Image (cartoon, grey):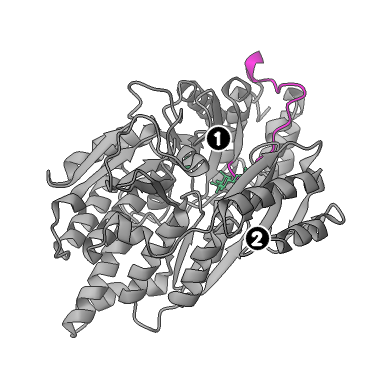
Amino acid sequence: GQFSGVCRSKDNTSHEGVSLAYGTAGFRARAELLDHVVFRMGLLAALRSKALAATIGIMVTASHNPEEDNGVKLVDPLGEMLHPSWEEYATQLANAEEQELQKVITEICQKAAVDLHKDASVFIGRDTRPSSKKLSQSVIDGIQVLGGQYHDYGLVTTPQLHYMVCCQNTQGQYGKATLEGYYEKLSKAFMELMKQSHCSGESQKHLKIDCANGIGALKLSEMKPYFPPEVLIHIYNDGTKEKLNHLCGADFVKVHQKPPGGLDMKPNERCCSFDGDADRIVYYYKDTAGHFHLIDGDKIATLISIFLKELLAKDFKMAVVQTAYANGNSTRYLQETLKVPVHCVKTGVKHLHHKAQEFDVGVYFEANGHGTVLFSKAAETKIRQLAKEEKDDEKREAAKMLENMIDMINQTVGDAVSDMLVIEAILALKGLTVQQWDALYTDLPNRLLKVQVADRRVIDTTDAERRALTPPGLQEKIDALVKKYKLSRAFVRPSGTEDVVRIYAEADTQENADALAHEVSLAVF
Ligand code: 16G
Ligand code: ZN
């Protein structure tokens, strides 16, 4: 029949008892459980490509999770996350028994109006995990079963794959769909911006980067020749000595609020960490007294917003999008000091991205360091026009800076390499040190806890996850606990990536934030 070949060798049968759901980060599990899942995601990518008559991306990575894990996620035509209407198909396909597979494919084709005779084109990328190569081979098998074409980019960061997919589907308007095209576009915009900067302090140029022993190290080294030698980036945790994400990387630094292993920090040195697939970044430094200072996604969003607000003409509508995890003082600073509207959405890049699309300029960041800036088509056209034709020198220079920012920012998804260049350029242009940046506002002390419960789905939330609807009585208990402390806030939500409930609390002191988080965790049971 037309699906001959759908059934593969026995290692692709679904594993009894393991039921996976396509969540905020696609599928994630121990690598040895994933072969049949990635094969089926190859099938799904081909189906989605046929449905949309566009190139679809598929990335094999488990981001900041341990090296033994792996995962897979699909990338939609403009570089966005897979549309939520298809997440359900992904879950159905991944969990189907071998003998049901053809039936499930037929159902998806009917529901989503897929014509199997259409062509399919899929771009594939993978991270540096030992299991990734073999898994991406199974992705290819899946694509080929449905007669699809593919291009395997091999080792790339997640945001690089998103970029390739977007370039391909916009006929090169967004850039060239090659690694060289990516490096050239970003480095050229960066060097143009640096020409506009008047400060040349030596210390400005040094940056230490913890690459989490992952793909970021490889890709940054590839990119280095595109910069002149005076751009001093130093790569640490490059994967040659230690394990991926082990005691290092953006997630480790954010969660533990301490420096990564493998990077020696001198006082006041500017440092940053990527995560395992280079779509997150956090900055940090150690002061002369030896205290560690974390500069997270909220403070990155704040720096970028300050810079953009100064350059943007009054008629551009700019907003910042955050999640419930954003530090209360970041929200206050943005709204009250900077006078920029702030919106709060549910956790997960797709929610932030979607909301940010509503504005001329939408800055979005999760506290964990994933974020980017989106410019509407109209805003981008206007800025490019001003950069060319504006008579007023000062305004034209401002427009040129914005134009280079647009070219340097990966608008498809948060990108550690691109975000790093954006931050470095802003610090240089504004002549800011890492300490001055950090001093914009002081983070409220906070605590993140996770607890295992029998069934995390009993917790249902509303108001961008800031309030619990169920189980009955839980929100009232949280409200009463929050009232006991000053500057306090707390919420609970079921994780979308782990079988746990997450608890977040902030308050006037670390002791109070810890106590509040602990008390809320007891209320969850
Ligand atoms: C996923 C999300 C990330 C989010 C995290 C929350 C994407 C691409 N990634 O990694 O944005 O912060 O999940 O995890 O959307 P949690 O639901 O386990 O707290
Ligand atoms: Zn990641």
Q: Nearer the viewer, residue 64 or 219?
A: 64
Residue sitting at x 64%, y 46%: 114
Q: Position of residue 270 (x, y in %)?
A: 29, 48
Q: Is residue 356 visible?
A: no
User: Spatial distance from mark 1 to mark 2, Cα to Cα?
Assistant: 35 Å
Task: Give the number of the disc on residue 144.
Answer: none
Task: From this view, report whether residue 37 is shown above or below residue 301.
Answer: above
User: Magenta segment range?
Assistant: 8-25
Amino acid type, label 1 = Val
The reply, left or right, for residue 225 in relation to residue 43 is left
Q: Nearer the viewer, residue 509 or 239?
A: 509
Of badges 1 and 2, the one in the foreground is 2
Residue sitting at x 72%, y 37%: 92
Dividing the picture into quarters, in which one does residue 432 lie?
Answer: bottom left
Q: Position of residue 462 (x, y in %)?
A: 73, 61
The residue tagged 2 is 489
Amino acid type, label 2 = Arg
Q: Position of residue 377 (x, y in %)?
A: 41, 70
The reply, left or right, for residue 443 in relation to residue 153 is right
Q: Position of residue 477 (x, y in %)?
A: 81, 57
Find out whether residue 10 is within the magenta segment: yes
Q: Secondary structure at mark 1?
A: strand
Residue sitting at x 71%, y 21%: 15
Find out whether residue 466 is within the magenta segment: no
